[in-house]
Each structure stands twice: as structure tokens, then as C-alpha cells.
Image (cartoon, helix red, strand yellow):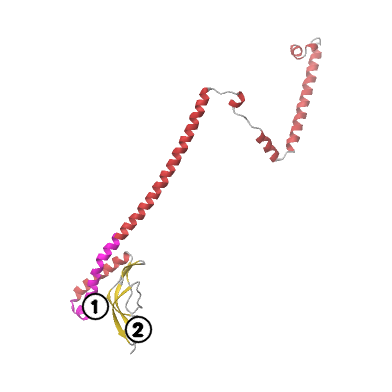
Amino acid sequence: ILIVNYCHPNLSYLSPHKVNCTISCVCAVSNVKYHLLRQLSNITFSKMSKKEEEKIEDDFVVEPEEEISGFSSPAQKKLREKLKKAVEEKQEYLDGWQRAKADLVNAKREFEDERKKIIGRANEDMIMELLPVFDSFDMAFKNKEVWEAVDANWRTGVEYIHNQLHSIMREYGVSRIEAEGKKFDPRFHISVETKNTEDEAKDDIIERVVHNGYMKGEVVLRPAQVVVFEFKSE
């Protein structure tokens, strides 16, 4: 009765039994209405495409509390300013760290390249200092009669040292320039003398080597000094 009086004062004259019946009817109608609305909503949304549902979700935007309330406290403003400043500082530090890292990588690469160049130049200088030693060995071996007259044991030891030096040179990529019997090439040979020949086929062919030439990879360390045939017809 109190509920009825509160909802509708004009029904207060009804008996308790009638009030119960009225409330039951109202509840039943409300229940039917709820189920009808639920079924209707299910049918409606089931007919919607996924794009339409997404559009509904996109259109439904929750505004920030400060915009809904229409005001914000000074503490919140101060906190937002600190947060914005922290984000900017973070990005600045990140950019600086990335630049420093890139500079370090480039510096390491340049240092390694420079180190290799210095080692390469030092090796070349050492090799150039050893070339006269090989010339001395070549001069000793050139006169075969005198060389073969030397004690066999001593000769074997000298030849072994000579071969060891050549092995070391090969490890550093140094090789002897082929010259004798080859066609003269100014890139690898220097003509110190010419020898006349009546054989046209021998023209510009290297007759003998005065000093051997050497190269490291594709770089000529010292060109070979040679004697070249020169064709002259009578």
C-alpha cells in the first residue's frame, strides 16, 4: 500500500488484495515489455553489418572527465604540464642517445679502417726493406757453377732460409712478377737495356731479368728491371 501510495496516490483506496493484483499486472506488463525490447534489439543488431557496428562504436566517444565536468583543478593542470615536459625530455634524450650511438659506430668503423691502412703501410715498408735481401740471394744463385761448388750442407741451409723468406712474403700476399720470356708490359716491367734481334717474333720480348719485381695483390711494389729484345731488320 505504501508503494502504491508513493507511485500513484489515487490508488490508495484499493484493498490489499486488489493492490497485489495491480502490482502483479504491472510487473507482468513490464516483464513482457522488457522481453519484447530485448528481442527487438537482438533482431536489429543481428541485421547490422560489422562495419555498421564499428561505426556505432567509433561514434560513441567518451569525453575526458575534465571536459564533461567543465573544470579541472590547478593540481591536475600542473600534473599535465609536468607529464608533457617529461615526455618531451624523454624524446630529447632518446634522440641524443641514438645520435651518440650512430656516431660511436661510425667512429669504430673509421678507426678500424685506419688501423688496417696503417698496418698495410707498415707491412709494405717492411717488405720494401726486405727486397734488397732477395736481390742478394738472386745474385748468389745466378752463377750456377760457383753456387754448386759451395759445400752442399751450407748451400742447403742458405736455400732453406731463402725459401722461408719467400713463404713469409706469400703469407702477406706478396708475389714475384713473372718477366723472363714474357712480353714487355710497362705496368710491371722497366727496360734497363735492349738487345737487338733479327727474329721479329722476339720483338718486345723480355730476354732476361736484372732485378726481380714484386707486387702485393694487384699493387706493384717494385717493377722488374729487364732486358728487352728489339727487332731490327738488316
Q: Secondary structure at mark 2?
A: helix
The residue shown at (48%, 29%) is: 82
> Is residue 205 highlighted in magenta?
no
In the rendered image, which residue does mark 1 sit on? 142
- Up-down: is 174 above or below 103? below
Residue 209 in the image: x percent, y percent? Answer: 28, 77
Q: Hey, which quadrant is residue 70 in on the image?
A: top right
Q: Hey, which quadrant is residue 198 in on the image?
A: bottom left
- Horizontally, residue 24 falls left or right of residue 108, namely right
The residue shown at (25%, 65%) is: 129
Mark 1–mark 2 Cα distance, whole angstroms, equals 23 Å
User: Mark 2: which amino acid?
Assistant: Lys
Residues packed near mark 1 inside 10 Å, few (<14), some (14 to 19) or many (20 plus): few
| Quarter of the rendering occupied by the C terminus | bottom left
Q: Secondary structure at mark 1?
A: helix
Q: Write the start and end of the magenta stretch as one range.
A: 122-151
Residue 173 in the image: x percent, y percent? Answer: 33, 65
Query: Main structural element of the magenta stretch: helix, strand or loop?
Result: helix
User: Mark 1: which amino acid?
Assistant: Lys
> Is residue 138 highlighted in magenta?
yes
Whether residues under marks 1 and 2 lie with C-beta atoms below 8 angstroms apart, the answer is: no
Q: Which mark is residue 94?
A: none
In the rendered image, which residue does mark 2 sit on? 202
Q: Nearer the viewer, mark 1 or mark 2?
A: 2
The residue shown at (45%, 41%) is: 95
Q: Hey, which quadrant is residue 23 in on the image?
A: top right
